[in-house]
Every structure is written in structure tokens, then in C-alpha cells.
Amino acid sequence: MKVVIHGNSMSPALKNGDEVTFESYRKQNIKIGDILVVNHPYSLDKKIVKRVSKVKGDSLYFLEGDNSYESSDSRTFGYISTESIIAIKSNEKSV
């Protein structure tokens, strides 16, 4: 699945206008550092792209933008459940 990035919340890794390929989420193991496409918790018609910064159990994830000054993320809306996940880009550096 290809996603076009809108805004600078994931800069410098992902910049406004970048086209990024994600893998559809099918219950893959999610690690800190992975980037997810999720349904926005308040605007159901909106999708957001954020990095996993914390994992709480098997079903809750704390997501943050790389550019904290321009990111609306889990610091505002809390943990995201796996039901909200649409796609994943694994961080190859994660162990």
C-alpha cells in the first residue's frame, strides 16, 4: 500500500510529499521503531502515520511523530489499539 505523507510530523525520516510503501497489517509483530498507518482516534475519516515509541501489552501502542513540534500523536490522544492499525513499515534496525 502506498501512502503520500502530508505535513512534517514525521520529518526528517518522512517529509511532506514523500510516497512511502507500507505492508498491510495482518497481525505482524510490532516493535518500537516501526512506523504505522492508523485510523485517527478522533477523526475517523483521517489516517495518520506515526512511529511506535512504547508498547503496552499485546494490543496497545504509543505512537509519536519524529518531529514533536509538528505532531499530534499519543501524547495528545493516548495509546492506540491494534484494531486501529491499517499498515506497517518495519524498522529493520529493531531487534
Image (cartoon, grey):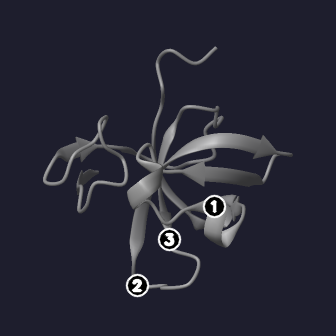
Q: Are marks 2 and 1 in contact (CB under 8 Å)?
A: no
Kind of residue at disc 2:
Asp
Residue picked out by circle 2: 45
Q: Which of 9 and 55 is in front in this view?
A: 9
Q: Residues within 10 Å of mark 3 (few under 14, many from 20)?
A: some
Residue pictured at 65% horizontal, 71% vertical? 77
Which quadrant of the rendered structure holds the C terminus?
Answer: top right
Q: Nearer the viewer, residue 39 or 75?
A: 75
Residue picked out by circle 1: 74
Q: Which of the two labelled residues, at mark 2 and mark 1, occupies the earlier sequence position? A: 2
Q: Which of the two labelled residues, at mark 1 and mark 3, occupies the earlier sequence position? A: 3
- Note whether 6 is above or below 94 in the view shown: below
Residue pictured at 64% horizontal, 32% vertical? 31
| Residue 49 location (% of width, % of height) | 41, 55
Task: Please tell me whether mark 1 sits on a helix, a strand or a loop.
Answer: helix
Residue pictured at 48% horizontal, 85% vertical? 43
- Give residue 9's quadrant in the image: bottom left
Q: Which of the two labelled residues, at mark 2 and mark 3, occupies the earlier sequence position? A: 3
Residue picked out by circle 3: 39
| Residue 82 location (% of width, % of height) | 67, 58
